[in-house]
Image: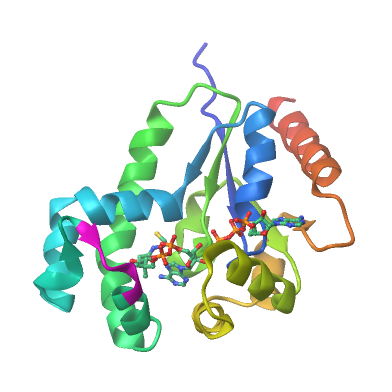
């Protein structure tokens, strides 16, 4: 009998919603996590095709000793839609292939693809189940300002380039509320048990 492929769970939500925090709980439950945003940054520093594309679009000074000037890129792409589209067309297919390579090596019952822009990139179509993480916008801005020492304006401009919760909710199988009212751990455990139960039965 051939073994079932792991269940692919997408975890998405706007910037600062609490995705990575929730994914750490999934990891404790034995569910490996592919962090798309982190892997994208790794690939932007190491993948020859992406490096060539970033230099072509932003000039050779976009890398200093091989380190990306993230602020320069963010200031440009989040203020110029066409440039953002070009960057995404370059980066997203490479990240998707990288996820597929990683997925082929997994042997657990379920795996997570954590991605802020899972819907926007179209990668949600590859997932078996999708969880959206929701928190009020002002709380998300406050969290990111504190975490990354950036201005509220820098966070808001990214939010403007992402889907809203109203767009995400109808396409999601589960919602986790990561506001300051509800505990996330019981929500994660309940959803995980439900998903694994239906998957293995
Ligand atoms: C602009 C860059 C240099 C900013 O780097 P920085 O270290 O500040 O942010 P990081 O990459 O860690 O992302 C932090 C958050 O920004 C938001 N964000 C990043 N890329 C995007 C995007 N294309 N659209 C909307 N929001 C985005 C997400 O909420 C993400 O969680 C970098 O994010 C980038 O090159 N992005 C374009 C490639 C991409 O789309 N990556 C993300 C998914 S694969
Ligand atoms: N439920 C919560 N209660 C209180 N603080 C939280 C909660 N969830 C996350 N945080 C804090 O908010 C900040 C953002 O959380 P996290 O990094 O998990 O968000 P994210 O959605 O992964 O963000 P990004 O899209 O920027 O990668 C972190 O400093 C984290 O410690």
The residue that appears at 29% across and 77% down in the rendered structure is 72
Does the segment drawn in magenta span residue 174?
Answer: no
The residue that appears at 48% across and 50% down in the rendered structure is 126
Q: Is residue 144 above or below residue 93?
A: below
| Image quadrant in which the C terminus is located | top right
Where's residue 34, x and y in %? 48, 42
Where's residue 169, x and y in %? 71, 68
The quarter of the displayed image where residue 44 is located: bottom left
How is the protein colored in the picture? rainbow
Q: Which residues are magenta?
A: 67-71
Quick one: which residue is furthest to the right in this view?
A: 181
Q: Is residue 182 above or below residue 5?
A: below
Q: Is residue 46 left or right of residue 139?
A: left
Where's residue 33, x and y in %? 53, 38
Total numbered badges shown on the rendered structure: 0
Ligand 2 shows up in the quarter that is: bottom right
Q: Is residue 172 left or right of residue 67?
A: right
Q: Is residue 156 left or right of residue 64?
A: right
Where's residue 96, x and y in %? 36, 51
The residue that appears at 61% across and 31% down in the rendered structure is 31
The quarter of the displayed image where residue 182 is located: bottom right
Residue 139 visible in the picture: yes
The residue that appears at 44% across and 56% down in the rendered structure is 37
Q: Is residue 106 left or right of residue 131?
A: left
Residue 14 visible in the picture: no
Instruction: Return the residue nearer the eye: 66 or 183.
Output: 66
Quick one: which residue is furthest to the bottom in this view?
A: 80
């Amino acid at each position: 009998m051939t073994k079932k492929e792991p269940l692919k769970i997408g975890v998405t939500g706007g910037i600062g919603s609490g995705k990575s925090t929730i994914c750490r709980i999934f990891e404790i439950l034995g569910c490996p996590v592919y962090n798309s945003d982190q892997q994208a940054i790794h690939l932007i520093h190491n993948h020859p095709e992406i490096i060539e594309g970033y230099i072509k679009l932003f000039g050779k000074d976009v890398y200093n000793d091989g380190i990306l000037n993230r602020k320069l890129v963010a200031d440009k792409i989040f203020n110029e839609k066409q440039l953002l589209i070009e960057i995404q067309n370059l980066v997203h297919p490479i990240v998707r292939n990288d996820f597929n390579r990683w997925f082929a090596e997994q042997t657990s019952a379920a795996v997570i693809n954590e991605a802020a822009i899972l819907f926007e990139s179209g990668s949600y179509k590859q997932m078996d189940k999708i969880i959206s993480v929701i928190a009020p916008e002002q709380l998300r801005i406050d969290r990111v300002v504190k975490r990354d020492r950036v201005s509220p304006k820098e966070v808001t401009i990214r939010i403007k380039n992402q889907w809203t919760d109203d767009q995400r909710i109808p396409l999601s199988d589960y919602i986790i509320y990561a506001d300051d009212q509800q505990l996330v751990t019981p929500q994660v455990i309940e959803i995980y048990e439900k998903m694994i139960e239906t998957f293995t039965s």
